[in-house]
Image (cartoon, rainbow, N blue to C red):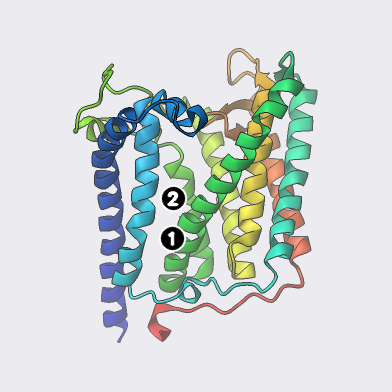
Amino acid sequence: MACAVSFIRVRSLGKIFLYLLLVLIGGALAAPLAWHLIQMLPPHLLGGLIGKIQSMPFHRYLSRSLQVAAILLLVPLLRSLRIRSFAELGLHGSGRPLKDLMVGLFSGAFCILLLESAALYSGAFVVHPGWGTGLMGALPRLLLTAAVVATLEEFLFRGVLLGFFRQVMVPSVAIILSAMIFAGVHFLNLPTAVSGEASPEWWSGLSALGSLGSSLPPWPILGWAFATLAVAGIILAWMTVHTGSLWAAIGLHGSWIVGQQAFNVVAGFRVQPPDGLLPLFGPPQCHGMVPVGLIPLGALLLAGLLAVILLRHRRQPPLYPLGNR
């Protein structure tokens, strides 16, 4: 029986790796087609929105194509893994989604308030002139981005990936492994241009994928950024396991995104050399979305502690190991 369960686990991992490969290939091949189709549309459509999309660089098309491919291929992946419901991924529905969402939002707001106050007080960041006007103009976009990105990433990383890991390994290992993968994926930066092409060819997406991770930040900034993402991933995974739903994690993740993007509009990092204030503060990484240093890590841990306190009376739902299904 143990050998049979081990074989099923290995076969399931193989299906997940195949899924990731198909996402990369499918998204890379679809991106040039999407670019050419969008360019054929009149720029004035949808109040000029099409024109703005047409002006986006190719790597943005590639990024969105990969996200769409990941979502579309999830259905056949879950079917091949014989996952018939979200409950088998440990997502049972908490019955109190609004309360869980508010716990996440409150914990995230607490973290952002501590972090950005410390950042300004340290002198590492300088406030931009006219930041108020810029922030108000950017706020709708920031809120929409936070909602979409937080929901998508939580579903993929804490819903599907963590849910599968929980079926084949103990919860603590599943949480840590999913957090490490979550952190590592953020450094697979797509190049901002593809061989200087004005019009991408059918192979341009595949060529861009060959440059993934080619622009990693220098050490020790890389190490601090990875630690920040890993700690965030652990906190988000714990909240998902403890509540049996994604609402708390979505709230926490979304508030982090809004807070960090808003701070990028308000102020900029001004320390030279960039690692001059480490280990306390460093330049934000991953397009300014990941704060770096001991102080950001401390703020994250305090947010996690606050979430633990707010959820301390919640009964953790049961797990569904693979061998018991």
Name the one closer to the observer, 24 or 125: 24
Task: Give the x, y percent position of residue 298.
Answer: 71, 42
Q: Residue at x 78, y 62 (%)?
A: 309
Name the one closer to the observer, 303 or 70: 70
Q: Which residue is mark 1?
A: 161
Above or below 114: residue 193 = above
| Mark seen at residue 181 | 2
Task: Give the x, y percent position of residue 95.
Answer: 67, 74
Above or below 205: residue 159 = below
| Quarter-of-image position of residue 127 | top right
Task: Give the x, y percent position of residue 14.
Answer: 26, 62
Q: Residue at x 67, y 33 (%)?
A: 139
Above or below 114: residue 253 = below
> Where's the C terminus, which quadrant?
bottom left
Q: Could you tell me if the residues under marks 1 and 2 are in contact, i.e. CB atoms within 8 Å? A: yes
- Is residue 123 visible in the rendered image? The answer is yes
- The type of residue carrying mark 1 is Leu
Q: Residue at x 68, y 27 (%)?
A: 137
Task: Give the x, y percent position of residue 128.
Answer: 71, 16
Is residue 46 left or right of 309 when viewed as pictured?
Answer: left
Name the one closer to the observer, 15 or 251: 251
